[in-house]
Amino acid sequence: MRFYSERLVPGVWTFVATFLIVPGTVLVIFPINQMVAVISAAVLYLLCVTLLIATSPVVRVEKGQLNAGRAKISVNHLGKIEHYDGDDATQQRGPLLDARAHLVIRGWVSAIVRIELNDPQDPTPYWIISTRHPQQLADAIRQAQEQS
């Protein structure tokens, strides 16, 4: 049973900024061949957008597991869950960060969830995961813990 799923795709402004590749490509290739310049610019922009979307990690809680990108952990090994936004999130990702923590963060998503691990075999003290819906992610993990 799936409790939560989110793909951390970039925001609209990232795609707008990426569009700057179009005039750059046209300026470089236009003196050689106008048609090739326009086609190359369009293909290059579509390739960049496709890569941005395809490489965006998925955060998912299902079947008693938390998946964050390629990493997976059983919800039974998860402890205290806290969520942060704004300056508090910046502090958690920066000055307060433990170098051993597992990170699945994206610059275009400001909110994070910090999840402590209860596994004594694991040297990772906690995970920090970017999410646009921190309360929903925390609730989904707690619900999965109750059902396992």
Image (cartoon, helix red, strand yellow):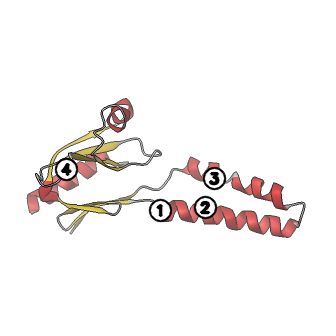
Label 4: which secondary element: loop
Q: Residues under labels 4 and 1: Cα distance?
A: 27 Å
Residue where numbered disc 4 is placed: 123
Looking at the rendered image, the disc whose residue lies closer to the viewer, 4 or 3, is: 4
| Residue occupied by mark 1 | 55
Image check: 48 left or right of 142?
right
Say which label, 4 or 3, has the lower sequence index. 3
Q: How would you rate the neighbour count of disc 3 (Cα within 10 Å): few for under 14, some for 14-19, many for 20 or more?
A: some
Percent of width and height locating residue 134:
30, 46
**Along the polypeptide, which appears first: circle 2 or circle 4?**
2
CA gap between label 2 and label 4 equals 37 Å
From the viewer's side, name the closer residue of 113 and 140: 113
Q: Is residue 80 above or below residue 10?
A: above
- Residues under labels 3 and 2: Cα distance? 7 Å
For mark 1, does the 10 Å Cα neighbourhood hold few (<14), some (14 to 19), or many (20 or more) residues? few
Q: Which residue is mark 2?
A: 48
**Residue that mark 3 sits on:** 18
Label drawn at residue 101: none
Badge 4 or badge 1: first in the primary sequence = 1
Q: Are marks 2 and 1 in contact (CB under 8 Å)?
A: no
Q: Please name the residue shown 58% across and 47% down the image.
A: 13
Q: Are marks 4 and 1 in contact (CB under 8 Å)?
A: no
Q: Is residue 139 above or below residue 57?
A: above
Residue depicted at x 42% and y 55%: 8
Q: CA distance from mark 4 to mark 3?
A: 38 Å
Q: Amino acid at mark 4?
A: Pro
* CA separation in Å, label 3 and label 1: 15 Å
| Secondary structure of residue under mark 3 | helix
> In percent of the image, x 47 and y 62: which residue is there?
55
